[in-house]
Image (cartoon, rainbow, N blue to C red):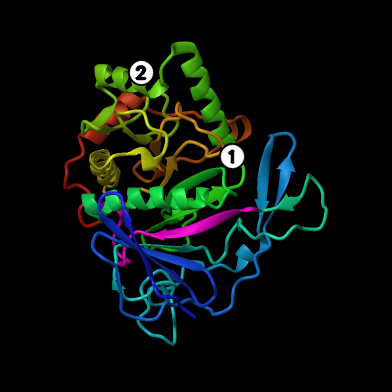
Amino acid sequence: MTTEPTSEALPGGYHSADFTKPDGRGLTLYGLQPVRVDSEIPSPSPDPVDARPLMRWHPVRGEWVMYAAHRMGRTFLPPPEYNPLAPTRDPEHPTELPRGEYDIAVFDNRFPSLTLTAPDPEPGPAGTRAGVGKCEVVVFSQSAQGRLCDLTNEQISLLLAVWADRTTRLAETGQINAVLPFENRGVEVGVTLHHPHGQIYAYDHVPPVAARAAAQMDAYVAEHGRPWLEDFIQEERAAEDRIIRDDGAALSVVPPFARYTFETWVLPTRPVSLLSDLGDAERLSMARVLRDALRRLDGLFGVRMPYLLTVHQAPLDTPRPAFPLHIEIYPYLRAPGRLKFLAGTEQGAGEFANDKFPEVAAAELRAVPDTAGDGL
């Protein structure tokens, strides 16, 4: 069954509408203009997947490990005519999305690693417990052919607002303590669907990366009396050689501590902790800088750069004003045709080895012509 849409206004004058899929999962459509749906709300199957994710504690690393056996049956590199992220054209072969007018779609992952209703498992080893959280799919466009950087600046600004809206909604469940939007792109990083899309993982705990970052940022404020981001932006603007683009309210930079060869960060220049803290002008500035950074990465070697893009916001367990909102992009090509593999020191020790100084990498990215990635 479907439900009538509930329309909501988002910051920036954007639009959204909520629906329920036949299998009970949620779907929200977002648009620069009012959302219009021209077909039934579909689902590849009317029956929900029996998801029973669980977690076990890793006592040596001090972190949780997720187990979700039902994910072995998820969609894997289907032919274009069976693209589950494209709008449904044949009602006999439904996809995840309806036909209509909208820019971005978000729905509950059919094969989640975490769920808000995960049942308590039988007692097991290593502190076995229910895998509580939520996993969502974010479809960037109705077109299967494009890239995130093919969206307009306004559409990417909408995406930032969508990520903010999802974070707010997930926090309102009372069960979520951290939210991570991300995009995997390229078979080299394990992508199983080529349609431009990302995911959101929401955790009932604070994952190790966010917990360590929050602690580091709190310690910086305790020592220096101001947020780390203030000093970082000032230092990078003074140095100039690692900045790729400075748009005023946001900039992109190959950080001086980059772990990947062409690692790129996109940051607001005003310290904020959450996407929802951005003003309209700041969000649009970040959109321009993000689009520019992704286009430069594609133009660098004349191929679609495989990458992992992660959006870092403050954990939600307590107010974290010192945490710097930022986007990290990890490109997986270190040279034409040469992938960056995580080897012994990265995997075993957690310390990266980089073949190129960030100053050199930033200069190469700044030298990429604006049109170098067109048509990829």
Q: Mark 1 — residue?
A: 207
Q: Earlier in the sequence, mark 1 or mark 2?
A: 1
Q: Position of residue 292 (x, y in %)?
A: 24, 42
**Figure check: 61 above or below 178:** above
Residue 212 visible, this angle: yes
Q: Position of residue 368 (x, y in %)?
A: 21, 39
Work out which residue is located at the far bottom of the displayed protein and give it.
92
Q: Residue 158 bears which disc, if any? A: none
> What type is the residue that disc 2 sits on?
Asp
The residue shown at (51%, 78%) is 22
Residue 262 visible, this angle: no
Q: Position of residue 164 (x, y in %)?
A: 39, 47
Asked whether 50 falls inside the magenta stretch, the response is no
Range of residues picked out in magenta: 132-149
Q: Answer left or right for 298 relative to 90.
A: left
Q: Mark 2 — residue?
A: 231
How many numbered marks, from 0 up? 2
Q: Residues within 10 Å of mark 1 (few under 14, many from 20)?
A: some
Q: Secondary structure at mark 1?
A: loop
For the residue pair 56 and 263, the one nearer the viewer reads as 56
> What type is the residue that disc 1 sits on?
Pro
Q: Position of residue 201 (x, y in %)?
A: 52, 51
The residue shown at (51%, 30%) is 352
For the residue pair 50 and 374, the one nearer the viewer reads as 50
Asked whether 146 falls inside the magenta stretch, the response is yes
The residue shown at (75%, 36%) is 59
